[in-house]
Image (cartoon, grey):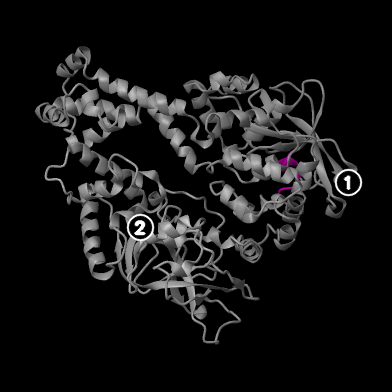
Amino acid sequence: MSGLYQRLHSERLQLRCLTLAAGDLADPICGSLETVSLSEHPKYEALSYVWGKDMAPTPMVLGGTDIPITQNLDAALRHLRHRQLSRSLWVDAVCIDQSNAVERAEQVKLMDRIYRSASTVLVWLGPAADDSDIVMRSIQKFDKQYWQTYDFQVGFMEILHRPWFTRIWVLQEFVLGKNPRIGCGAIWIPWVSFFFAWDDIGGLDVGGAIDREYEEQFREAIIKTFQPLWLQHIVNQTTESELASSHVILPELQYGFGENFPQLMGFHSEPDLLRDIEENPSLWSARYAEMRYHLHKSPTAKAYWKKSELRNIIPIQYHNFLWHSRATLLNRKSLSFVTILKGTMNLRSTDPRDKIYGILGLVSEEARENIPVDYEKIAEWTFVPTMEYIIKHESDGLVLLGLLWCTRPFKSSFPSWVVDFTISANSTDCDSPILLRGSCLDASWKWTQDAEISNDHTTLSTSGLSFGKVKAVVHFTEGDVQAYVKQFQNIESLIARECPLNEPLWRTLIGIHNTGKDALDTDMPLHQRFKVLMGISDSQTEPRASVALAHRMFQDNILPIVRGRAFFVTDMGFAGISTPGIRIGDTIGLIFGMVRPSVLRPVEPNDLGVETMLANKGIRFHRITAFAYVGCHDRDEFIQLEKDGLPDWTEHCCFKNKDILKFYII
């Protein structure tokens, strides 16, 4: 392919444009390359798309030579070319010599100018599928009434599941482009129209229509099981299904009908309902199987759960982030790395280096000058200077460590203070500390930050507070509710011995949910539910509905926090929950500016193969091995200080009389 790609002179702002030959949809794809200079203001459109993995069954003919392209690009070019006239496009996979790492690096540095200079950016989502034509036409017509329907919102959700919304590179392509147009199949619409529809149906939550249909079908399915036709069918049917207990049935009934579910289902009281379940176990087991089908396996249920999956695929409020980013850059301002990375935590890239290279067009010129672009070197060669720049120039830079974190080998020369930019934030990952919030330690106190990076780029020195050395660790083991309750009971005994001032255990176990209204403002607050869960309720005979609420608290609030993680206590009387990489002897440290407490382990640089200029100076080094939630000792005092604007951290009991320490992290 060397004949196709003549050398580009980056100092002349050169790039190649693809002249896409005219043709019908089924015709072979043909085109040629032309070298142009951005300084001469060439006319072209830039394509924003996802490469895809599979090569097209028929290659593209470029300058008389067959070259392989992916199926997604093949489909995009077929839908983009005109029938009578050629079209000038910039397409990265074709216009950049992908076999030339030096050229790739040089073109990455020009990427912001390439997309800014294009007459428009064409966002290709892929061929028509899953009723996408109906969805796109309704947006084209601005049919806001149809946007509120179940069919539209399911179709729109399917579009959001397309790969374009999950990739990092397309971010700057869209944000920098002039008047982007979004295409799916043969239909192209202005980006503003698409985003209006996205916002109108609730952003990432994609709409109440799916939720309403799911809940309504579930209630109708239950009601149907009390009708004679269904009852007769069950009587005549032989079933070997496992009998279901009231403990599993009641939570589902309450979910469908609310707190007064016995009356709404025709029973005078909850005891009457319980009696009916006990007297007709086979009938209720069949009824429960129907309930479970409509909760998890029906077409509507599958749509509901697929909608829920979006939170782990697309960043929360992604449409707002894209909209506001365009506005910021339109005003000739730049974005900070922290703003971009927090807004794009779920996005992915095939090449780990592209998690940084793919956003360089959005940051300041100073930032770009400090970040080396080199595809011939390993990813860490880019990650270290990037994190160093962030810490030095962005006041909230250390926050990233508590967001983009995964367990890494302890004996590694890669600095533990450098974010792993390759990971995607996932609240279901036990290594992720995202849910470990809700305590006084991660509030917005006015810490005095003094983070510095050593001249040899090995060590982060920064101030913080210690909450003691880890004295005991309890790793949560998988099991049913009762298995976890047994672990919680043992932990309460441990707290009584070692941490008598710690907050109630239920607060520690729910982490980030401490900041939610469910902690206080429900018919049965979480602290009461926890008592029922633990079997220590004040009531002699707790209603089964309360048991159902307690089990739902476990599933919704506790299990996402504790699964795969560990409980710990320290020699200073603090307790909390940590990501897995914690052990006895570690230090729980709050590094100013990091938001979440970190788990620090003493280490000698030589043990890691690290040569640092700070060695042999009596300095004690640590590595970050995990992150933690640490329980508050006086939440009422903390809440009052929070209402006062957190004026002085030294006034809070958890911090009083604590010495500010210097941590050296490698």
Q: What residue is disc 1 on?
A: 39
Residue 114 is covered by the magenta coloring: no
Q: Nearer the viewer, residue 70 or 467?
A: 467
Residue at screen point 22% across, 34% down: 250
Nearer to us in this view, 199 or 519: 519
Q: Residue at x 55, y 19 (%)?
A: 145
Earlier sequence position, callout 2 versus callout 1: 1
* Residue 566 percent location from the top left of the image: 33, 60
Residue 607: mark in rendering? none
Q: Is residue 203 left or right of residue 89?
A: left
Instruction: Depth check: give the residue in front, 378 or 401.
Output: 401
Disc number at residue 565?
A: 2
Residue 371: x %, y % from top left: 70, 61
Image position of 345 (left or right of 234):
right
Magenta segment includes 94: yes
Q: Which corner quadrant of the image does residue 641 belong to?
A: bottom left
User: In the image, what residue type sits under mark 1?
Assistant: Ser
Q: Nearer the viewer, residue 561 or 657?
A: 657
In the displayed structure, 213 sits above or below 487; it is above
Measuring from the top left, give residue 415's x and y in whole percent. Answer: 55, 69
Neighbourhood count class around disc 2 (C-alpha, 10 Å): few under 14, some 14–19, many 20 upward: many
Q: CA distance from mark 2 to mark 1?
A: 56 Å
Q: Can I make out residue 63 in this image?
A: no
- Left or right: where does residue 145 sit relative to residue 75? left
Q: Quadrant of residue 247?
A: top left
Q: Give, as a single range, the part of the protein colored magenta.
A: 91-99
Give the secondary structure at mark 1. Answer: helix
